Amino acid sequence: MVQLVTSGLGANKLKTVTNYIEAAKLAVNVRENEQKTAFQKLNNESEKVFPTFLENLSTSEAADVLRFLIQLNPQSDLIDEVQRILNEAKDFDCVDFNTLLKILRYSNNVYLDQNILRKVRNSVLTRAQNELDKPQDLISLVHYDTKSAWLQNANFVKTAEKLVDVMGPGEKIAFLKIMGEKNQRNVLLIRKISAAVSRSSQCLTIAQIQNIVQSLVGLSYFSPPIMKKINEDLPKHSNVLQKWNDVVSISDSLLRLRMGNEKTWSFLSRWATQNAKEASVDQLTRFVSILSKIGVPIEVGKPLAEVLKPLLNREKLRHPVAWLNIIHSLAYFQQLDANLADSVLNKDFVENLLTSSLEKHDRLRKALILLSINGCAVNELENYNGPTISKSSLEKYGILFNSDSIREARQLKYTKNTKECDEFLAKLFQIAPRDKYCKHSDIEEFGTFVDAYVMPEKETGRVVAVEKWNTNPRPIFFYGWQQVKQDVENPENVLMGSAQLDLRLAKKRGFSPIVVFKTDFDYCATDIDKLNMLRNKIHG
C-alpha cells in the first residue's frame, strides 16, 4: 500500500488538489507501521507544490485539504493558509459531511480558528438528521469534539436516538461510556440505552459492567433497569473474576451510586475474602473502606476486616488522613482495639491531623471522625484506658463547637441540598416550637450531628418544655436521599455506613433515636398527614 501512495507523489505527478486528496486517502489507510513513511512522503511533496494552487481552492477542496493536513501534518504552515480561504466561505453546506466529521475528529491536534469550527458544527447540526447515519460516527463526534454540547440539541438528539436503536450492545455501552467521560449528559438517551442493555439476553462482561457503572457515576444517574441486570450478571462471573483492580473499581463506582443490593455486596465481599491473599494491602484497605462506607452488615464485611487488621502498618501508610479513614472503617466493623485507637487518639496524631489543613469544613470533618472513633473506643472496648479526646479538648486546635460549626456540620451532611431538611424542621417546629419545646441541631460528643431534640411525655402524648428536661431527650435524625442506599429490589430505607454508625453510638450512649426519612414525607398526601406522621414518630 505504501508503494501505491509514494509511486505517484513525484512533483511531476502531484499537480492538482485532487491528486493530493486521493494520495492522502491512500495514506491514512496504509498499515500503521508504514504510515510514518507515507505521511512524510506526502507532506514533503505537497509543501513543494501547494503554494502554486492554494488560491484557486474551492470551499469543498479547502475543507478536504484541511482535514488531511490536521491529521497527517498538524505542524504544517499550510494550515493557516487553508483556514484563510475557509474563513471567507459563508457556510460549509457544500462540504462532504464525512470531511466535516473528520475536521472535528482531528481538531484537537492543532489550534483551529473558532469561526471555522463554529461553521463546521453548525453545518453538522443542520445536516445530521439526514446524513449522520453511522453509529461509529456519532460515537466519534461526541468523543472527540468535547467543546460542543451535542446532546443538548433537540434535533441532534433525535438523530442520536435513531442510531442508538441500531447499535449493538457493545456500541451502546461504548456510547454510554463516552457520554460519562465527556460529561455529555442527556437523560433521554441514557434511559434508552439503559433499557436496551437491561433487556439484552447477553450476560454483561466484567469490562462492560465496569464501563457502565463508571459512566453512570460520571453522568450522576442511577438506572434501576441496568442495576438490576448488573445484580443478576455479576455473580455469574465468580469463576472468571480474577483481577482485584476490577473488583475495587466496580465496587467504588457502586458506592458512588449508593447501590445497596445486599446480594451483590455479599458476592463481592465473599470474593474478596476468598482472594485476599492475592491482594495488596492498599487494595484490601480500599475495599474494606468501601464496604464500611456503603454500610454492609457487619457480619458481611467483618471477615475481610479481620484479614486486613494485622497487615496494617502505620509507618507504611504515612498520610494521616488515609490512616484515620481506615481506622474509622475498622471501627464500623467492630475491629477497633486499644492499639489502633491509640494510634489516632494520641496527642501527636491529633495535632498533626488538625493543623495540616486550614479549610474549615475539612478540619471539622476530621474532628468528627476522631470523635466517632473515640466514641467507639470508649463505648465498645472493654477496659479501654488509652488516650481519649472530647469536644472541649479539640478547642486548642481551633475546632470550636459553636453555631458556626453546627452550620458547617449540617453542610457536611446535606451539602447544598438542605431543602428537604428545612421542610422537616419547619413541620417539626409546628409540633414542638423551637427552643421552647424542641432543642435545635447540635454535635454530640461521639461526633454525630443531630438535627433536633425533643422530650416526649408518654402519659399526655405531648412534648415536655426544654426547661423541664431532666433526662436524656430523644435525638431526631433526618435522612434525605444522600444518606440512604438505592436498591431496586428493596423498597425499605437502608442507611449508608456512617449514618448506621451514628445511630449505633447514640444508642450506646443511652439515647433513644427518632429516625425520619425523606420518604416518610413523600408518602404523606397533605401537610396534616406530615404532622401526624411526625407525632407518631416522636411518641412511637
Image (cartoon, rainbow, N blue to C red):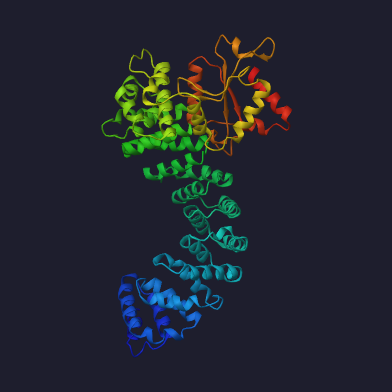
Work out whether residue 506 or residue 442 is closer to the camera in this orientation and state it.
442
Q: What residue is drawn where x is 33% and y is 73%? A: 35
Residue 373 sits in which quadrant? top left
Q: Is residue 515 left or right of residue 11?
A: right
Residue 371 sits in which quadrant? top left
Q: What residue is drawn where x is 49% and y is 38%? A: 264
Work out whether residue 488 or residue 510 is closer to the camera in this orientation and state it.
510
Looking at the image, residue 311 lies above or below residue 244: above
Residue 440 sits in which quadrant? top right
Find residue 484 and report its horizontal and vertical position in percent. Answer: 55, 33
The quadrant of the rendering that contains the C terminus is top right
Work out whether residue 1 or residue 431 is closer to the camera in this orientation and state it.
431
Find residue 40 and report its horizontal and vertical position in percent. Answer: 31, 76
Find residue 13 and report its horizontal and vertical position in percent. Answer: 36, 89
Residue 45 visible in the shown view: yes
Find residue 275 and report its horizontal and vertical position in percent. Answer: 36, 38
